[in-house]
Structure formats: structure tokens, C-alpha cells
Image (cartoon, helix red, strand yellow):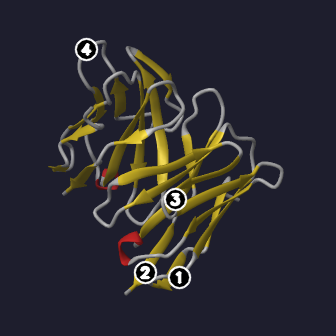
Amino acid sequence: KNEVEQSPQNLTAQEGEFITINCSYSVGISALHWLQQHPGGGIVSLFMLSSGKKKHGRLIATINIQEKHSSLHITASHPRDSAVYICAISSGSARQLTFGSGTQLTVLP
Amino acid sequence: NAGVMQNPRHLVRRRGQEARLRCSPMKGHSHVYWYRQLPEEGLKFMVYLQKENIIDESGMPKERFSAEFPKEGPSILRIQQVVRGDSAAYFCASSPAGNEQYFGPGTRLTVT
């Protein structure tokens, strides 16, 4: 079993829809990261969180430490949000990231 | 403040050649991580370095792969005698203190 599980693997939405991507993990962590990988391959760090909730524009990330679960929400989705969204955890002294398999999001106009 | 730089962006090598991938961290960042993304697979940790020191290389193959982060200059990931299975995207990320990580654009290695 992977340490980090994401769902769904693929998600297609209509422009304007509210989107939720889920991430569960099975080990103790120092932080959880949400990343966005563009079609061209570049990776952007969206959030790093260890408790509660963070918001940036139309993106919201939440984490429940007791349940070992995090969600990434996108409000008023837009075709430019189409990308792979990756959940990753950092743990241990080195803080290297362990990644989920990613969620391919496609937002249709 | 320039972001994390990686070069080359694309690298083609024949089997048996050496590949050198470079990563210049963001200014003021002394922590560098290397990750590999094999085709159709997720990202995997390879190695974590601080200036002049390898801190954790538990994700790096034991043979043919090495990494360094000298006092001056970029971090280098070196792959000797490349094989087709080394074809992948190699990303580095830098961090000021081993917490939030900023990713470079990646180097796409193709072994023919």
C-alpha cells in the first residue's frame, strides 16, 4: 500500500464547477504539500500545510491530522486549471517528499 | 530573485554515455533535493544534499548514479553508462531550510 493515496485519478469538470481532490496518507508527517504539474511538465508548489486550512485565490487546501486526510478545492474552475494535481508528504528529518500518483484534472469550457 | 534553474532542459544520450544534470538553487537556499519521474509514473525521491554534504541518498540507485553540491556552483546529478531505463524527467527542488520546496523546470533525459 502506498503511503500517499489520491482520488480520483482522473476528473473532468465543466467550467465553473467546484472541484475537490482528496489525499490520504498513512504515516506521521511534518507537512503536506499540494503541487500542480502543468501539461508542459513544470511543477509549481501550491500549498504546504501542517494543520487547518489555507486559501490562495480560488484554491483552498485543508488538512485533518487526526484522520490523516487532506483535500484540495478549486472554486469556479476554469480551463486553465487543467493540470495534474499532486499530493505529497514530508516526514523525517530530511523532509524529502513522498508523492501520490496525481489527479489529472480536465476542465472543459 | 530567479527561481530554481536546471540545465539542460532536454538531454539526449546514447546507451553507455554519461549524463550530467545541473541544478542551481534559488538564492539563499542551501538545501537541494533531486526527484525522478519515470514515464507514466509518479515522482520519486532520489537524494537530498546540503552544501558540500549528501544528507540522504536512500532513493538513489546504488550504481552509476552520483550527486554533489559543491561549495561554489550548481548541484550536479551524474549518471554514468546510461541505459534506456534511465529515460525520465529529473527535477530538482531547493529549500531555504528543509521545509517548503521550490521546483525547477526539470531535465528530460532521453537515452537512445
In the picture of the structure, the residue carrying the numbered disc 3 is A86
* Residues under numbered marks 1 and 2 in contact, where contact means CB atoms less than 8 Å apart: yes
Q: Amino acid at mark 1?
A: Glu
Q: Amino acid at mark 2?
A: Val
The part of the image, by quadrant, that contains residue B104 is: top left
Which of labels 1 and 2 is toward the front? 1
* Label 3 SS: strand
Q: Residues within 10 Å of mark 2 (few under 14, many from 20)?
A: some
Question: Residue A85 appears at what percent x and percent y?
Answer: 49, 63
Q: CA distance from mark 1 to mark 3?
A: 20 Å
Residue furthest to the front: A57
**Mark nearer the N terminus (1 vs 2):** 1
Question: Residue A95 appears at what percent x and percent y?
Answer: 58, 33
In the picture of the structure, the residue carrying the numbered disc 2 is A107
* Label 1 SS: loop
Q: Residues within 10 Å of mark 1 (few under 14, many from 20)?
A: some
The residue under the point 35% across, 63% down is A38
* Residues under numbered marks 4 and 1 in contact, where contact means CB atoms less than 8 Å apart: no
Q: Amino acid at mark 3?
A: Ile
Taking the image as shown, residue A36 lies to the left or right of residue A28, namely left
In the picture of the structure, the residue carrying the numbered disc 4 is B72
Taking the image as shown, residue A75 lies to the left or right of residue B28, namely right
Q: Residues within 10 Å of mark 3 (few under 14, many from 20)?
A: many
Q: CA distance from mark 2 to mark 3?
A: 17 Å
- Of residues A5 and B59, the one nearer the viewer is A5
In the picture of the structure, the residue carrying the numbered disc 1 is A17
Give the answer, above or below, for where A51 lies relative to B110: above
Question: Residue B56 appears at what percent x and percent y?
Answer: 52, 27
Identify the subunit bearing mark 3.
A
Identify the subunit bearing mark 1.
A
Q: Quadrant of the C terminus of chain A?
A: bottom left
